[in-house]
Amino acid sequence: MSLVYTGVLSHAPGITGRAHMVENVEKRDEFYSALESQRQDIVNSGAEAIIVIAAEHFANFFMNNMPAYCIGISENYEGPIEDPKWLAIEKTQIPGAPDLGKRITRSVMETVDVSYSEEWKFDHGIMVPLNFLTPRYDIPVIPVNINCQGPPLTPLHRSWAFGEALRRACDAVPEKIALVGTGGISHWPATPDSGKINEAWDREFLDKLMRNDKDSLLSYSDEDTYRDAGQGGFEIRTFITAAAAAGGEGDLHFYTAELPIFAVGCTVASFSLS
Amino acid sequence: MSLYNLQKFLYELNRDESIQKQYKDDIETLLSNYILTDEESDALRKGDIGLLYVLGVNGQILMHFAAFLGIEWFDYLDKMRDGIEDHGEVRDGVYAMTGGGKSFTSEEEGK
């Protein structure tokens, strides 16, 4: 039928793996409630499959052959690759949607030279969102990756074009599809600065994102992002792609910089589709 | 080129349980599959998070390796800080330390 839901959310491994360390339990649970509401919104949308636009962390792709964009078309996926105890998510199998994934890929290829893969292991970048959005792993998943790790990185305007291509592809198939972008905003993960968050930068970015202001969103340079938002800020590509796919304004359901133990400003938002 | 090989070693280890088993059972044979400097090989043998961080291993790859080694979260952060103390600034990549080694969480400060 078409795209029936679009949103964004955070995926940092601490969200599940360090839940037990959190001092601000009230704020943590407020965040989890926002994620549960997002799950319910997706269920209520009638989605038959969920596209997860992620910024993976070397679970599948390496600098020997790094795609800017890749869509998963496998029947099954496995994850997490990380130690299950560390991530507090058990290893499991996740159903894919190969036929739908191929149709989506074929359509996207009309305008964006996307890679595809029939072999894909999920890391925290996808497992943490699924842990909250499809905790019984009962909605087929189409993983999508944007390289946000190994520069050179795809330009932001190409992420926007990719989002628009995904929207056209979703609207051309009979299935109801939910799409979520998952990334961080400002953060310095996997460094000694883990927990550092530039809240002002985050709020300015989220304001632009919720207004779905294309020109403002595409005005960030990687140099500025690296300086102000850290290497984790490169993941804004996933949020921008989701905004482009939705086309409409956003609704910020939750944001806090008060859970630095999760190493990211925790975010949950949805978009109207236009 | 050597940092590339060092990261590839860890990338393949992180995603493959059979390689993880070989790391524990027969690391020398595993190391012989990669062209590495003595410093890099030694850091891998020892699981020297601090040195690997300074050598420029991508933080995400290193974080997964630290989890595989069973290193607790705050110890992992400290090992990276110790690496800077012992070996100087991060030599490559985009995972440099920018916060002067301080903690950014009350949970760590109160540990």
Image: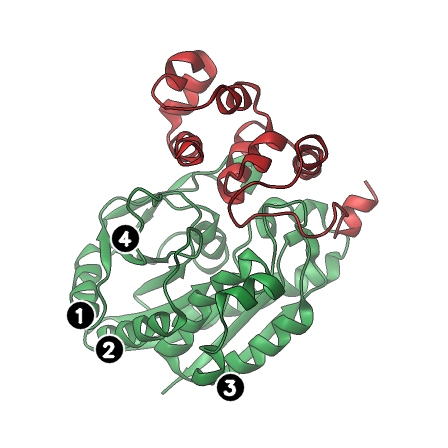
Does residue B51 show up? yes
Crowd class of label 2 (few under 14; some 14 to 19; many from 20; radius 10 Å):
some
Residue B47 is situated, as x and y percent measured from the top left of the image, at 56, 24
Residue indicated by mark 3:
A211
Chain letter tied to red = B
Residue indicated by mark 4:
A96
Q: Tell me the mark number nearer the camera, choosing from 4 and 1.
A: 1
What's the residue at 63%, 63% (across, down)?
Answer: A265
Which amino acid is tagged 2? Arg
Residue A153 is situated, as x and y percent measured from the top left of the image, at 39, 59
Residue A215 is situated, as x and y percent measured from the top left of the image, at 44, 84
- Cα separation between marks 2 and 3: 21 Å
What's the residue at 39%, 52% (across, down)?
Answer: A137
N-terminal of the pair, mark 1 or mark 3, is 1
N-terminal of the pair, mark 2 or mark 3, is 2
Kindly check if marks 2 and 1 are in contact, taking CB atoms under 8 A apart as contact.
yes
- Cα separation between marks 2 and 1: 8 Å
N-terminal of the pair, mark 4 or mark 1, is 4
**Chain A rendering hue:** green
Residue indicated by mark 2:
A168
- Cα separation between marks 4 and 1: 18 Å
Identify the subunit bearing mark 3. A
Q: Quadrant of the C terminus of chain A?
A: bottom left
Element class at badge 4: loop
Residue indicated by mark 1:
A107
N-terminal of the pair, mark 3 or mark 4, is 4
Does residue A89 show up? no
Crowd class of label 1 (few under 14; some 14 to 19; many from 20; radius 10 Å):
some
